[in-house]
Amino acid sequence: MKAILYEAFSQPPKLVTLPDPAPEPHGVVVRVGATGVCRSDWHGWVGHDPDIALPHVPGHELAGTIEAVGREVKRWTVGQRVTVPFVGGCGHCSECHAGHQQVCDHQFQPGFTHWGSFAEFVSIHRADLNLVALPESLDFATAASLGCRFVTSFRAVVDQGRVSAGEWVAVHGCGGVGLSAIMIAVASGANVVAVDISDRALGLARELGAAAVVNARQVEDVAGAVRDVTRGGAHVSIDALGSVVTCVNSINSLRKRGRHIQVGLMAGDHSLPPVPMGRVISHELEILGSHGMQAHRYGAMMAMIETGTLKPELLVGQRITLEQSIDALMGMDRFEGVGVTVVTKF
Ligand SMILES: [Zn+2]
Ligand SMILES: [Zn+2]
């Protein structure tokens, strides 16, 4: 198969030919129909993820068709259209037994713990637990864009943030994660204030229904601006970028008893933000994380997509070839594209 491979961190990946994968007894092999290019792929390539063993094939936001099925798999057959959450469960640990596969003790993460989907084929483990069937109406590019940023945002807003109609939600960073969170929060009936440094990204946020925007380059005090707009602070605030500045701004944007949700990865120099714990105590704030979403929670999200309440296709940006994914991956820290870049030609 054709695949993108890197043999050293921070060195340009190459388009190579590798042996086709065979399914694990409990897994399947998926012919990749589309795969998203994500900032987590960039973090992995730079060397921020200790799970990655070299040489490595990146890619974790995928959708495609089942090509081969392991002998123990009961629910799936060749030819079915599927996607997977970026964190798959083992099915045996206490977290999996409790239904929290997104924090499984023995995670399967294509593109991190195992080779990923920047390839014609990808091997997926524990298929009965981790695969999600795609509705016919959902194309591969849109489905691929769900697997990481959209589902993590869905879990952040709906399950972790417990956002209800009429609440104010602040979203810091309007890339793939942030725009997803805005769409989902608006669909949940919340009022959204979007924060970014790019007027173009803020324009998209407005189009997706943000009630207010703050350009972080144009105000002295971003959190203060959010507290003004929301008359006292957001009920829920999301750091959708993952940086010291956006994390602290997000916490300071909250009203009393508000919930901060960390979605953007805090890697490298940003791994230890100076969280204002005094404020967390005096305002009784909650600080929560969101780490993907379990396959069994996809049903609620898919229903909102099928009825048109959520329109993830609006977040798909550039469609590129497998070869072009090399440049897209290496440039992910430059924030050039708007929306989610998806590989659709292999
Ligand atoms: Zn598990
Ligand atoms: Zn991702």
Image (cartoon, rainbow, N blue to C red):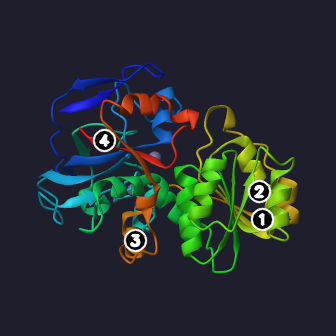
- Which three-letter amino acid code belongs to the residue tagged 2? Ile
Distance from disc 2 to disc 1, alpha carbons, whole Å, reads: 8 Å
- Which three-letter amino acid code belongs to the residue tagged 3? Ile
- Which three-letter amino acid code belongs to the residue tagged 1? Leu
Q: Is residue 49 visible?
A: no
Residue located 18% across and 66% down the image: 75
- In the rendered structure, the answer to whether residue 118 lies left or right of residue 171 reads left
The residue under label 3 is 305
Spot the residue most to the bottom: 165
Mark 4 lies on a secondary structure that is loop
The residue under label 1 is 285
Q: Quadrant of residue 170?
A: bottom right
The residue under label 4 is 117
Mark 1 packing: few (<14 Cα in 10 Å), some, or many (20+)? many
Residue located 76% across and 47% down the image: 216
Residue located 63% across and 74% down the image: 163
Residue 61 image position (x, y, % from top left): 38, 48
The residue under label 2 is 251
- Which part of the image, by quadrant, shows the N terminus? top left
- Which part of the image, by quadrant, shows the C terminus? top left
Mark 3 packing: few (<14 Cα in 10 Å), some, or many (20+)? some
Mark 2 packing: few (<14 Cα in 10 Å), some, or many (20+)? many
